[in-house]
Image (spheres, rainbow, N blue to C red):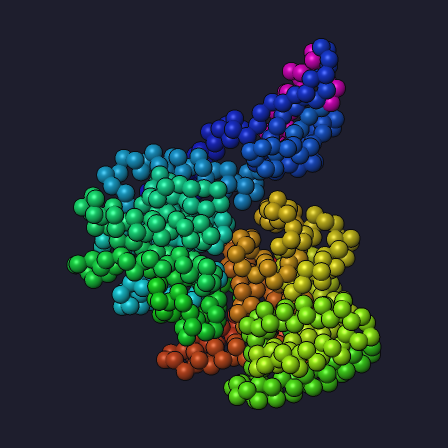
Amino acid sequence: MVDLEEAYAKLENILLKKYREENVSDFSISGTKRVARKIGLKIKGIPINPNSIAEGFMVEELEDDVDEYVFGIYKENVLLNNVDRIYEELEVIVDTLLKEMLLIKEYRKEVYNEYLYKQIDKINAYAPEMEYKLDLEDEPLYQWQNEAYQKWTENRYKGTFEVATGCGKTKFALYSIHRIKEQYKDIKVKIIVPTKALMDNWYDSLVQKLHIPTKYIGRRGNNRNEKKREITIYIDKTAQGKFSADFIGTITDNMVGNTNFLNFIVADECHHYESPQNIKIFDKIDYMPKDQQTGINYFSIALSATLPSDYSKNGKLKKYLGDIIYTYSFIKALGDGIISPINIVDVSYQLSIEEQKRFHMYKKELADAEKELTETLSKYNINFSQEGISSLAYYYLKEFEDILNYISEKKVEFEQQYGDKDWKIYFDEWLYEFAGRNEEIALSVKNYIGKFERLKRLLLNAEDRKKRCIELVKRHIDDKVILFGEYIKDIEEIYLELASEFGSEKIKLYHSQLDKAIKEKTIQSLKLDTTKVICVPTAFDEGVDIPDMSVGVIYQGKRSKRQQVQRLGRIMRKTKGKKSAVMYNLSNQSFGEPKFLDRFIEEQLHLLETMNDAEEKVEKIRKQLSIEFINYDEEIENSNIINKLIKKIRI
């Protein structure tokens, strides 16, 4: 077993030499017999600090067919008899860049891992057989991990686990693999993930935590197509084709080789696999015959921090991987000291006089649309609750999308055929004849959703809401801040305003429409700590590997508990030196906007209070969790609440 921290120290000099050989090379562009137009070094995978570049040298990003982020450091118009001196100066620059790189945790890890994995493999090569060995002496399991494992064994080694972010879901799965390997020597592990970042995280964990030689780990997806191995990691889109074939292949291997391998499936972020397309990944796993001795056909663990509320009732995945058998909320994690203390602050805002006028007008029109929709649903004997009418309306909007598209197309036809004056008369006559139950519901739903969205947009784009959001970010400009929005256009406006004051290096924008290379650079700059604030819409909520943040500001958000818990997960992970985290939520209850995780926290605490010996734990949670409120008339700049929170974060 290899102590990686000790290996880091011992191998540093060897590694730097090797890393330099692989990532630094000469390049030149000829000019005349006596002068080189450009002469310098081509560097990849090394952060470039402009302050470390000696005077007279230039830095330029180079196009490369194989690698991204390749830079040239060079001088122009160099006399050829000065080349040796130029390269000596360049060597000094590279030495400085490499030393600076080793001070950065994320680069240090990235640089060392590939070489260290080779050293680990050499050591493991002398073992008589591969061991799955999780070191629990220095980092013992949390109580919840032991409890969850016990539940899993009682449930015949299948089950779904909903566990808060930062509480050790991956380690729980590794421990389960480790224990099963001890009992059943012949297993094939198949791990399914939704993103490349998670594939890389699992690969690192298998090598560093479970001490698996890299030759036994295959990766399939993101331009990797390594053949199935003892352990294989799949990205879900790739898994649709490869996973089923590999799973069934285990049956064939057993028949041909007279072996008795059992598959062990881990589905990370399992809520991603509920879609009609992704669920096909698992449609052949029931073909696996049961082991005669144990009666088990495969082991399975499904992991998620935020399952859909109807997962147990309507979830498709539970048929294959098992229903929810264990939950561990961030409230429980606070009581156990696993995550950072959390401060939740609801920040109110006000509407201008003009915005208030529009608010009351829009609210009345929404009430009329809701009344019409209610009557339509009642007419066709559709059961609904008044509280859930919005959710039902969005459901029908999606359900009747084709009908609404057809009606819109007919509307355009009538406009073109009859002109501006008469088209609506003829269109209404056609609609009266054409419309049946589904068409009538679809049109009522569309009218309601239009009015609902208009009122929502008014509140989400209120001037004071935006102003107070920007003020909150400014108060925390030297902390690690993630700013959440709902719409790309809105979040871009705030980004531009902040970037104009603090610069585009300190403030970054991240959303789905940006180029992949730009997004990767943004995440890297966060890891390097050159970026302090990242502005993101909803698309950022899950599936993106970002470094730990201390402050969240919700400029715009949905009312769903699931989204709010996801966003909270971005800031509550416990890391070395981190004392506390704070989440600001802009809302106004008088406009019908709920507080952050409204009622959910108290419901969870009340549930804990009903359990045995819970009084002490609940009291501990209340000390780890503060809930504050800043009224719309309290200045952000001089807020005593914010002053106290800044001190707590920066201790």
The total of numbered circles placed on residues is 0
Q: Would you say residue 39 sits in the magenta stretch?
A: no
Q: Tell me: residue 131, above or below residue 570.
A: above
The picture quadrant where one finds residue 87 is: top right
Q: Tell me: residue 308, above or below residue 439.
A: above
- Residue 480 shows in this picture: yes
Q: Would you say residue 93 sits in the magenta stretch?
A: yes
Name the one closer to the observer, 504 or 649.
Answer: 504
Q: Residue at x 45, y 74 (%)?
A: 310
The picture quadrant where one finds residue 314 is: bottom left
Q: Residue at x 73, y 22 (%)?
A: 76
Q: Tell me: residue 544, above or below residue 441.
A: above
Q: Residue at x 71, y 10 (%)?
A: 33
Name the one closer to the observer, 187 or 448.
Answer: 448
Q: Where does the magenta region start and end?
A: 76-100
Which quadrant holds the C terminus? bottom right
Q: In the current view of this chain or complex, which residue is farthest to the front?
A: 417
* Chief SS of the magenta region: helix
Where residue 267 appears, as percent x and y from the top left, is: 40, 58
Name the one closer to the observer, 355 or 373.
Answer: 373
